[in-house]
Amino acid sequence: MQFRDFLPVSTNTSVKESCYGALGALVGLLGTALLCRWGLGLEVHWLIAPMGASAVLLFAAPASPLAQPWSILVGNGVSALMGVLSASLVQDLTIASALAVMLAIAAMFLTRSLHPPGGAVALTAVIGGEGIRALGVGYVLLPVLLNSSLLLAMGLFYNRLLGRRYPHTGKVAPNRHQTADPQPSERLATQATDIDFALEKHGELLDINRQDLQELLQEAQLHALRERVGTVRCQDVMSRDLVVTAPAASAMAAWHLLSRHQIKALPVADEEGRLLGIITLHDLMIDRAERQPRSQADLEGLTVADLMTREVQTARRYQPLYDLVEAFSDGGLHHMPVVEGDQLVGIITQSDMVAALFTLALQPGLAQARGSDAEAP
């Protein structure tokens, strides 16, 4: 043990989030107190001290597993019950206090509702004075569960108002193809089973859920990838000799172009080379409105302008290739036009991305070499 072990550690929390947490506690506790004291007319025990600790978790650390609705309601509820039970069975306040907190922790572990303020809730049932002890089991409902419910309601409203994800369930984002497979970016990354193995081996409770821990690891891995390939630009891997169609071209003409060049998408540009949209095999084969396959007869009389996608996600010529990885993997894109201003200058496909990343994996120094070339006068 060294002296620096007692020094505070960095929380990596922004000033804005710190202010949001402090303001949230003010709003939550003030609202709870006003509703209990003035709204419901409670004259005594309208707010108990442990709610201050619950507010710290709910508003300052809403992503914590200890701050989720189940933990707040059930954790405080079973702790209150254990406190009342200890106070009624043991007359000595010292022994009853220790017993109450012990039983509260055990009950919270059993109900998977660990909430640190629960220890204070149980302790209050024992040393809160004759008024609290006189409430008996009623202490569980009022003020504990009433305070907890109102504070939670304030927390739900406040966190949603700020755009925070709360309750923070840690659910995995669904696969866009609606299958049980994980997202492409997650298949070679650290898996949930790996996280579970490490947590079980560690043994101690960590104040972070499995999904958040997995996301942090993936973010770190992606950052490392960005450092390795960040100097490779879209122009380094894009196709430049493009097969392009015009909006006035017939749908059948677009079909023949796709077939002849064995490609799956055509950028649509005007005579000046400005990008107007993109048309794919899917656009030609499937009627989006009817969600039915098209026949050759259905394409007769239709033009590219009738079927093309006009809102197109594009890349910039000098944009780092890394920026496109998520769109091509989890986003499901197969082709992305590259523009300079409004001019179409190239296109990147999934094949281009796979080839580029594979080459960089085999030749780690290639990205640095390209970076040096880019900096050369």
Image (cartoon, rainbow, N blue to C red):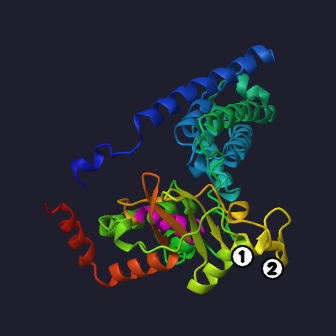
Tell which residue pokes out farthest to the left in this image. Answer: 377
Q: Earlier in the sequence, mark 2 or mark 1?
A: 1
Q: Nearer the viewer, residue 208 or 173?
A: 173
Decide whether residue 333 is among the magenta residues. Answer: yes
Which quarter of the picture shows residue 307? bottom right
Q: State the residue at coordinates (65%, 38%).
A: 160
| Front residue of this view, candidates 125 and 226 | 226
Q: Secondary structure at mark 1?
A: helix
Q: Which residue is mark 1?
A: 252
Kindly identify which residue carries mark 2.
296
Q: Residue at horizontal 41%, vertical 72%? A: 240
Query: Which residue is located at x 22 percent, y 48 percent?
Result: 3
Kind of residue at disc 2: Gln
- Where disc 2 sits, the SS reads helix
Q: Position of residue 297 (x, y in %)?
A: 84, 77
Q: Position of residue 214 (x, y in %)?
A: 51, 65
Q: Nearer the viewer, residue 158 or 93?
A: 158
Determine crowd level at label 1: few under 14, some 14-19, many 20+ residues with C-alpha closer than 10 A: some
Looking at numbered disc 1 in the image, what kind of residue is underneath it? Answer: Met
Q: Which residues are magenta?
A: 322-334
Tell me where residue 29 appears, x and y as whole percent. Answer: 63, 25
Q: Are marks 2 and 1 in contact (CB under 8 Å)?
A: yes
Q: Is residue 196 visible?
A: no
Where is the N terminus found, in terms of image quarters? bottom left
The location of residue 62, given as percent across then percent down, is 57, 43
